[in-house]
Amino acid sequence: MYGNPQRRSAADVQTLRREGGQWLRAQREGAGLSQRQLAARIGADYYTFISQLETGRGRLPPDRYREWAQALGLDTRKFVTELMRFYDPITHEILFDSAG
């Protein structure tokens, strides 16, 4: 099974998830949405799902990227590109690092 694409320690992965969660929170707040409002926009049953992601206790499923980008008023490609920094940093570096 393909469990850790970053080949990093669990602590490193958790740090990236927290940073990604902070980024998601900043996007939500920038859109002027509460966790409950965002949950309603993306069709989540519980706003606690948003809280879990924002604290790094989870990962946004790729099949929900478009919904989230739209709910936050963001360009989908830019949204996914930014998420890759936290969820799959090696692929992000290969694709977008100007030195690579």
Image: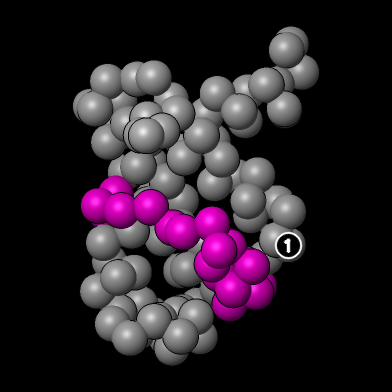
Q: Is residue 49 magenta?
A: no
- The quarter of the picture where the C terminus appears is top right
> Residue, x 54% and y 46% (percent of image)?
83
Q: Quadrant of residue 13?
A: top left
Q: Visible in this render: residue 100? A: yes
The spot of residue 4 in percent (x, y) is 37, 30
- In the drawing, does residue 44 fall left or right of residue 58? right
**Kind of residue indicated by mark 1:** Asp
Q: Is residue 21 above or below residue 4?
A: below
> Residue, x 72% and y 27% (percent of image)?
95
The spot of residue 73 in percent (x, y) is 66, 73
Q: Is residue 5 above or below residue 38?
A: above
The spot of residue 57 in percent (x, y) is 25, 52
> Residue, x 63% and y 51% (percent of image)?
80
Q: How many marks?
A: 1
Judging by the rendered image, the residue that carries numbered circle 1 is 75
- In the drawing, does residue 74 fall left or right of residue 31? right
> Residue, x 46% and y 59% (percent of image)?
61
The spot of residue 37 in percent (x, y) is 42, 86
Specify start and end residues of the magenta stretch as a single range. Answer: 55-73
Q: Quadrant of residue 63?
A: bottom right
- The quarter of the picture where the N terminus appears is top left
In the current view of this chain or complex, which residue is farthest to the front? 1
- In this rendered view, identify the residue nearer to me: 93 or 31: 93
Per the image, label 1 sits on a secondary structure element best described as loop
